[in-house]
Amino acid sequence: MDAYDLITRNAAEVVTEDEVRALADDPDGKRAYVGYEPSGVLHIGHMLTANKLIDLQEAGFEVVILLADVHAYLNDKGTFEEIRETADRMREQFVAYGLDEENTEFVLGSEYQMDEEYVLDTHALELETTISRAERAMAEIQRGSNPKVSQAVYPLMQALDIEYLDLDLAVGGLDQRKVHMLAREVLPSLDYDVRPAVHTPILADLSTGVGKMSSSEGITISMEDTEEDLREKVNKAFCPPTADPEPDGEGNERENPVLQIFQYHVFPRFESVVVERPEKYGGDLEYDDYESLESDLESGELHPADAKGALADYLDELIAPGREKIAEQRS
Ligand code: IYR
């Protein structure tokens, strides 16, 4: 796969394609990042952007993971001490997940976000930005419904991170898009360059296919799930024989989360996927790409129950090293 295809595969949005093409022309040594508010255990949402970072490493990029401790604090995720502790554990879990340690720089936000220059730049952006503009940028990230001043400052600092970490590309889930758009607007006011962004899709709720999969509500897949947990969660998942299900009874759009996980988690990490079946049901099936699995599910050649069994196996393989790391961290 060429660099542009690796950078953009499975992306929901690329801002802008021309800017990313320019990076893809000479990717070696270019720097890309994702920032995460530290939390105790990685979940499947972290792993989705991590898959993109692994693509970028394969394309020749240097990868930076920002453990955004100050941001988590501003977004009401706990005391600074608690957040700092979880940041250290998260770092080890990312490495266990498969990021190339040699080629991944982990940075704590607090290492540079309290420096005078950064703080003064934050204030300069506060002067440039209305409260309502900042609130809009935070809509999908904000914890709680009554925004605090800290949550208006948050997206401005996220914009500055792109400059201060000396990045060429920002990566994030689609929930980060409004912050990245704000960054494009405000960075030039400080004479800083605008950088492109790649946004990954947000997985649908596992049991209904409606709305987002969320770690705070509903069911998510996490790195501490046992093989049995995974099997149970996947078995209960919504999986009609199509990637494009009809809206539900209330007119809500639905997705097929089982297929989404195959597409965004399994195929990028495995050369091919084998669905084991007893001979009397036609024997094993092997897929080299996501599209052929999707079309077999649609045609009825692949039964949802068999697809789910295989999905649980592959998820288990992906998270097993992280699960062991978590057990070690707790002992
Ligand atoms: N907003 C992210 C956390 C975050 C991301 C980046 I990229 C930063 O520069 C700072 C914070 C989240 O929602 O987890």
Image (tube, rainbow, N blue to C red):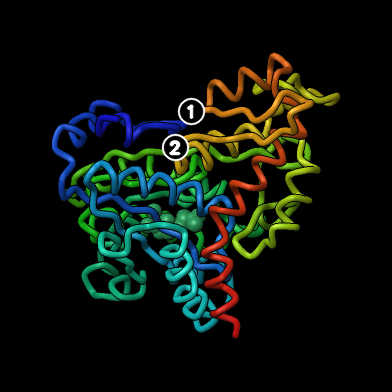
Res. 19 image quadrant: top left
Residue at (30, 30) in percent of width and height: 1
The reply, left or right, for residue 108 in relation to residue 329 is left
Q: Position of residue 284 (x, y in %)?
A: 65, 30
Q: Where is residue 243 in the image (x, y as percent from the top left)?
A: 65, 23
Q: Position of residue 175 (x, y in %)?
A: 52, 44
Relative height, residue 137 to residue 293 (above, below)? below
- Indicate the amino acid at tag 2: Glu
- Indicate the amino acid at tag 1: Asp
Camera-nearest residue between 175 and 101: 101
For disc 2, the marked residue is 271
Residue at (41, 66) in percent of width and height: 67
Residue at (26, 64) in percent of width and height: 102
Camera-nearest residue between 320 and 250: 320
Pick the quarter of the image with the C terminus: bottom right
Alpha carbons under labels 2 and 1: distance apart: 7 Å
The tag on residue 288 is 1
Question: Does any portion of residue 3 appear in the rendered image?
Answer: yes
| Ligand 1 image-quadrant field | bottom left
